[in-house]
Amino acid sequence: MAQHSVFTLSQVAQHKSKKDCWLVIDGRVLNVTKFQEEHPGGEEVLIEWAGKDATQAFKDIGHSKSAQKLLLKYQVGVLKGYNFQNDADAPIEEPKKKDMSAFVINDDHMPKYAALVEFSLPILVAGSYLAYRFLTAGLLTF
Ligand code: HEM
């Protein structure tokens, strides 16, 4: 799990200008200074919420899933004392182990020896053919 700095709300409140704009959403401390101009909802709303907990405002808009994922890109830390209630809310940037296991299970359907057979079968066939040609050529000569 990625390590994050822990900030209090009063520390976040020190970053409330256009040139240094932080806010909190779902316990994540976000530095949105560089995102202001890109924000489809305009920079004004971000400045309005700068230095504050904008969770409710963010949710009220009904931001899309991709907007929610975008939050991770701007995360610089977590809010002190915030209780991440479930895994989905936890500040994790890498895929969860549970998600990964789905891929591992799919791999397990193919036994390891099957991969070896799959690899060596063409070599065996080619080798047998060459041996056959070699032996039959020898027989024809004599
Ligand atoms: C880092 C924080 C934020 C990110 C990454 C973000 C991202 C986005 C994105 C991607 C959209 C386009 C629509 C969508 O995909 O949902 C959007 C629209 C919008 N956002 Fe944000 N947003 C953030 C914070 C906020 C905050 C704090 C407010 C405050 C109210 C806000 C207000 C809006 C509004 C008004 C729209 C336009 C909605 C519309 O046109 O229907 N956003 N935002």
Image (tube, helix red, strand yellow):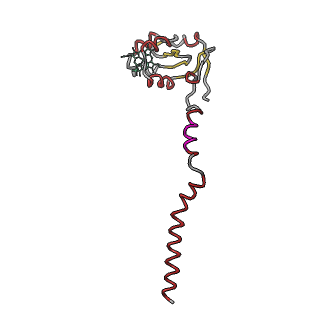
Residue that protrudes farthest toward the bottom in the picture: 142
Q: Is residue 74 left or right of residue 108?
A: left
Where, by quadrant of the figure, is residue 37 drawn?
A: top left
Considering only vertical position in the picture, is 106 above or below 50? Answer: below
Task: Residue 2 in the image: state x and y as whole percent.
Answer: 60, 29
Residue 75 magenta-highlighted: no
Q: Residue at x 49, y 88 (%)?
A: 141
Query: Which of these two is toward me, 111 or 12?
Result: 111
Q: Main secondary structure of the magenta part?
A: helix
The boundaries of the magenta stretch are 100-106
Task: Residue 7 in the image: state x and y as whole percent.
Answer: 60, 16
Task: Residue 117 in the image: state x and y as whole percent.
Answer: 56, 59
Q: Residue at x 54, y 16 (%)?
A: 26
Where, by quadrant of the figure, is residue 100 drawn?
A: top right
Q: Is residue 3 left or right of residue 52?
A: right
Within the displayed image, which quadrant is ligand 1 positioned in? top left
The quarter of the picture where the N terminus appears is top right
Query: Which of these two is toward me, 117 or 14?
Result: 117
Q: Residue at x 58, y 23 (%)?
A: 90
Query: Which of these two is toward me, 22 or 79?
Result: 79
Total labels: the figure holds: 0
Residue that protrudes farthest toward the right in the picture: 81
